[in-house]
Amino acid sequence: MKATHKALSLTLLGATSLALFLPASSQAAGFVEDAKVTLGLRNYYFNRNFINQTQSGQGQASGWTQSFILDARSGYTQGTVGFGLDVLGLYSVKLDGGRGTTGSQLTPVHNDGRQADDFGRTAVAAKAKLSKTELKVGEWFAVLPILRADDGRSLPQTFQGAQLTSNEIDGLTLYGGQFWKNSQRNDASREEMTYNAGGTLGIVEGDDFNFAGGEFKFNGNNTMVGAWHARLENVYQQSYLQLTHSQPVGDWVLGANLGYVTGKDEGSAKAGNLDNKVYQGSFSAKTGNNTFTVAYQRLSGDTKFMRIDGASGGTLVNDGFTNSYDNPEERSWQLRHDYNFAGMGIPGLTLMNRYVSGDNIHTGGRTDAEEWGRESELAYTLQEGSLKNLSIRWRNSDVRRDVGADLQENRLIINYPLSIL
């Protein structure tokens, strides 16, 4: 399998390189004309206080970084098969953060316990397109329902692999592929895919991550049905079914997001016997500048929600800034309110508040543990002027739990996307 994907990588990369040397008038016009290049400037401050106990002997985890995210995406060369290239240049500099405040995951941590002064990496992906089907090979910021790269800190997580995406049938998108390695959000290296089994096993290394799925949109794109299956070879396999719907009713827009996830061990079961199911539903109602959301998430089985170590839990309806409420047997519900201040004459200013409560948690030797969390985000995006699209977000969170440390957290995130091409 390794030899196959290496050969595939070399073939596509070689074909793309050849296409770049062809005369622009006959082949490469679309490669340049449709290219987009942006430089994202991200300033990130993070402070998390552990209230009822220390975490690894620390009372807090904190850090402050300035990051530069170059996102260059070419168009496709002309011809029956078009070729292109995507490049992510990632670099982050520590502005503040010492040995006694590690754990923010803004930067790597050295063996001596010190946070790195800077880190970064380059991710390159070649792509080829035939009709409405695209093959991509290399490394990029992949976001799929069964594998979501995490972009919640200084730099985004990236995955290295190959993916085929087809839109040949109207409304239907088919996906398939394999990922081999990943770089987590606070790591400059490329490592094997791993899974956090917890307990005495801890982090276990899997083999390739294989996936296939499809999403079908209909009813004027108001309804979507999705089905996915993935395998981290010799660790776990997981299937996901999803239904989303949006329905205008007078001055309201009602929305629903229903999902079912089932997972178990796979192959040689390096992480032991695994068993997990998730039943979930999120329901929203939007009117004017207000959006109200309620959500329910129910886990069953002896295992928490399965995901690649370091990946986002965004598939779960109760996943948030600080917690995913994904412990074995946990039941959780959420109340959320979003407000857009454009209704008060301040376009670009938004406020989100949510409360999540979980119970029936089977962890730490208990079968009745509980937890709750409150999260708020106040965000403003400049609408005009030389700094148009600059955004400022303040996130304030609290988590209280029966098992584990209570948290109080603040984040200040400033993003400025600078368009270069």
Image: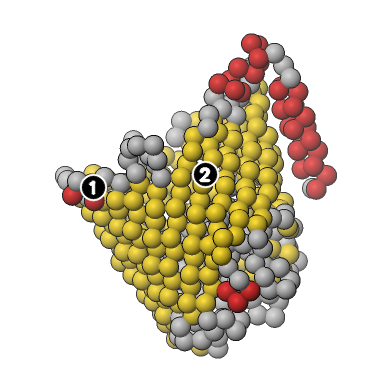
Q: CA distance from mark 2 to mark 1?
A: 25 Å
* Number of other residues with Cα within 10 Å of mark 1, as a class: few under 14, some 14 to 19, many 20 or more: few
Q: At 70% from the left edge and 59% from the top edge, which residue is drawn? A: 193
Q: At 53% from the left edge and 29% from the top edge, which residue is drawn? A: 421
Query: Is residue 116 in sight in this rendering?
Result: yes
Residue in the foreground of this view, choosing between 66 and 176: 66
> Where is residue 7 shown, x and y percent of the image?
81, 38
Find the residue positioned furthest to the bottom.
Answer: 365
Q: At 66% from the left edge and 63% from the top edge, which residue is drawn? A: 116
Image: 321 above or below 252 = below
Find the residue positioned furthest to the top.
Answer: 25
Dividing the picture into quadrants, the one containing residue 130 is top right
Mark 2 or mark 1: whose residue is earlier in sequence: 2
> Where is residue 323 shown, x and y percent of the image?
47, 69
In this figure, which residue is indicated by the disc labeled 2?
40
Q: How many marks?
A: 2
Image: 293 above or below 342 = below
> Where is residue 406 shown, x and y percent of the image?
46, 81
> Where is residue 84 shown, x and y percent of the image?
64, 29
Which label is found at residue 346? 1
User: Looking at numbered disc 2 in the image, what kind of residue is underneath it?
Assistant: Gly
Q: At 63% from the left edge and 21% from the top edge, which residue is drawn? A: 77
Residue in the foreground of this view, choosing between 130 and 387: 387
Left or right: residue 284 compared with residue 271:
left
Image: 237 above or below 216 = below
User: Looking at numbered disc 1 in the image, what kind of residue is underneath it?
Assistant: Ile
